[in-house]
Amino acid sequence: MASPRDLLAPLDTFERRHTGSPAADVAGMLQTVGFDSVDALADAAVPANIRLKRPLRLPAAASESTALAELRAIASKNKVFRSYIGMGYYDTATPGVIQRNILENPAWYTAYTPYQAEISQGRLEALLNFQTVVTDLTGLQIANASMLDEGTAAAEAMMLAHRVKLGESHDASVFFVSDKCQPQTIDIVKTRAKPLNVSVVTGDHRTYDFAGKVFGVLVQYPDTTGSIHDFAAFFEKAHAAGALCVVATDLLALTLLRAPGEFGADVAVGSAQRFGVPMGFGGPHAGFLATKDEFKRQMPGRLVGVSKDAQGNPAMRLALGTREQHIRRDKATSNICTAQVLLAVMASMYAVYHGPAGLKRIAQRTRLLTRMLADGLKAAGAKINAEPVFDTLTVTGIAAAQIHAAAAAARLNLRPVDASTVGISLDETTTVEDLQVLISLFGGAATSLHTDRGEVAAAPVESDYAAPFARSSEFLTASVFNKYHTEHEMLRYIKRLETKDLSLVHSMISLGSCTMKLNATSEMFPVTWPEFGRLHPFAPADQTKGYAKMFAQLEKWLSEITGFAAVSLQPNAGSQGEYAGLLVIRAYHESRGEGHRNICLIPTSAHGTNPASAAMCNFKVVPVACDANGNIDVTDLKAKAAEHAANLAALMVTYPSTHGVFETSIKSICKAIHDHGGQVYMDGANMNAQVGLTSPGYIGADVCHLNLHKTFCIPHGGGGPGMGPIGVAKHLVGFLPSHPVVPLHHDTGGHHMGAVSAAPWGSASILVISWMFIRMMGPDGLTRATKFALLNANYIAKRLDALFPVLYRGAGGLIAHECILEFRPWKKHGLEVEDVAKRLMDYGYHAPTMSFPVPGTLMIEPTESETKAELDRFCDALVAIHGEMAAVASGESDKLNNPLKHAPHTAAVVCATEWPHPYTRERAAFPDKWTRAAKFWPATGRVDNVYGDRNLVCSCVGMEAYAEAAKPSPTHA
Ligand SMILES: *Cc1c(COP(=O)(O)O)cnc(C)c1O
């Protein structure tokens, strides 16, 4: 019997919910792997010279309810004031049907990036809707499926313009930025421009003379002060000077305003935040980027396109992948990998729910309120910016300090501009009562907006614009935006899409390198607490003490876990962490008079983001070879470090390697780099094999990023959000990112690298997820999780090695937390690894990582949070598939007409009158008994990637016509 002490312990301890299998199962797994204990396995797998000598110094584990209570207390230190700050962030009413069924729904938030199109049609459709919203409203032809935020989208647009003009062998190097853009956007653009030797000129577009060789211009519409300019003449001048025109804009305003594509814009960027996504103290939100068809191959980020499946039905998948970092590496159009899919899905659903008329009404209401406010302020004697405006007024000639004090007393925030100026931005949630409060702050009569009978007394004002500002083109005419306007219809539409997607609610998703572990419900709860969700990122510090405390704790914990001196929470994806970390290294070299150092060594096995990020810093990538065991070829590395010693800037190294191996030589690798004057950047995507056992700092790295959406439990969201904070050693602390609006505490060294994200702490609101994880696991729980990640991976490797050989191993024949399985020998029988990936869908599984880092392989990472029962079910599926492959190899099954080549099998195919296959329908759809108990039906047959890229359709407008053209041809079996 348990002791009283044990029985009285909290019932809701977390670690047992997160990690591993029942004790008896663990014993069985250990036996299979050949160890007596999990500790013994970890001792054998991790090289002794990098093992930490002491436990992590973190608070002991708290139970689920205790951790939530503690975070509640922290959250209560945040003050939720009404925000009129604007600057790209607006309060919004998230429709309940979207909050509950998407934002708070694991079926949506635990999905992976939709690379396996057949089991991702739901979010692909939502993303196609998002792209349509953006192209329709901006009046441009093509938009991608989200950017990380508005500021980085503007920087990506600058780089797009630069590439286009370099492609025309233009030597232009000047980028003009209107000084009326959002300040954080200007700062990010400058940060980006510096390493590329682009000179950013800021000023007034009305007087800009295009001196020098200008390749692009960026303006804001409406601008940061609220004014709306007619850019047609300016863009004509810009085009005549050979420049591309970029507009940062606002989707809600565009429902009333002339579309940028109609006055000459080549690129439009912005944020879709106010389409139903909470401000979250800075994020996450979906940025967007739209451009002309002629620049589509220069676009950054992921793009959803329509293609057809094996039956000739229309089906969506990611298009033009050849632009991206995973293929083009340092020649990629950008380094973006994880984007903001969940938030783009939410924004698209907001547009679906409101429809074009509903959106326009929200915009007209916002505009009307702004005009009423303007009238009230003018009556009170204030000076404001001239018409036309949309939602933002800049009030001048006032004693700003007094106004802010009165505003704070009324629990609201205005934008501080200077001693005699404030800004006021209204939004969807503003009411007439709010206007009265605002007007009275400026000494106006508080009752001026109502008649004696209590009716609104506003003078009738035009809610639409006059030419040339008025929008004349229609938008969102596609049927999807015009039929789901009741909650029942909306709920069922969301549900229909949801059921097409396979996520962690169905089965393990063993994507190597992506660490698809448990995203616990208790970790997710705080994300939608108003004390975290409703804060403006530039709210005054005395209102955000809860956030400050949570950041300080999380930074401290992550510093301890990484073995570094400090952490910056600003980068909002792993790719952005890489870029920020390399900028830190660049700034460090510069500070020592070694700004010429520009060589970045990167092993050939590295993730595509590594070389793409290096290119953004204008580093020259020198690849380092790997040996037959999958390890960095140390001889080659040392030779290259020595050869480039004079210019060596950095090594980018992933540890354990992307081959799933703990390289024993890692310490000497770091030393060789340091000996030649370089810095070591560690890609922390594989931290799940390090936490508590070793650390980047302990190993000898100088910087690393962490993918909080991998090791630290932020869900993948179907392709984002993520967070990519960086940790740095002591000598680099002064070089961490700064922010132009909010001073950051690292920012004391005077180096001012600039901002890498629009918000000072990136996607702040989802940091609570990682906070909860670390708080609930404690130092022992985190360390055990790492050990179980090793056990689970080695168990899978042992179970499958005889059928599909494990490609690389470390010392003692062990792997780290993931393994690469070999499928290339099956090529001679006409079987590709893709056939295995698609066949796994029939068994209810998402394929592991395919063909990265080695073509023709699968990389499996089970994580610590799967039980033996689930690991066995997955292995059984691969064993059964091996049987099907062997039947093809032996000639027992037809080479082409077999369950592998026709996978995945849809319900429509299995139920069809015709069944032209030699295997049974049962074999096709119910290959194992668990599929009888819970069948996941792939929504489409195998998607034809090539067809879609040749016939690019990227919005739902063209989808119906396309469906017609793609009708099944009689020859298609
Ligand atoms: C996921 C990953 C990245 C990129 O991180 P994102 O958050 O997707 O930008 C970089 N390197 C490795 C090894 C990864 O697995």
Image: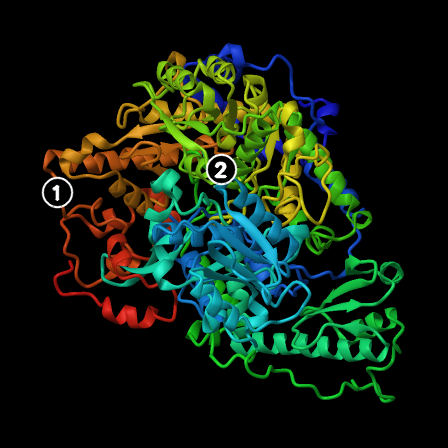
Residue at x 62%, y 71% (from the top left corner) = 228
- Label 1 CB sits under 8 Å from any ligand 1 atom: no
Vertical position of residue 396 compared to residue 937: above or below: below
Give the Cα separation between the discs numbered 2 and 1. Answer: 49 Å
Secondary element type, mark 1: loop
> 421 and 856: which one is in front?
421
Sooner in the amino-acid sequence: mark 2 or mark 1? 2
Where does label 2 land, which residue?
617
The quarter of the image holding the C terminus is bottom left
Badge 2 crowding class, 10 Å Cα cut-off, few under 14, some 14 to 19, many 20 or more, is many
- Label 2 CB sits under 8 Å from any ligand 1 atom: no
The percent position of residue 838, horizontal first and vertical second, equals 29, 45
Instruction: Say which amino acid is labelled 2.
Output: Cys
Residue at x 63%, y 78% (from the top left corner) = 364
- Taking 491 as reference, is 379 left or right? right
Where does label 1 land, which residue?
895
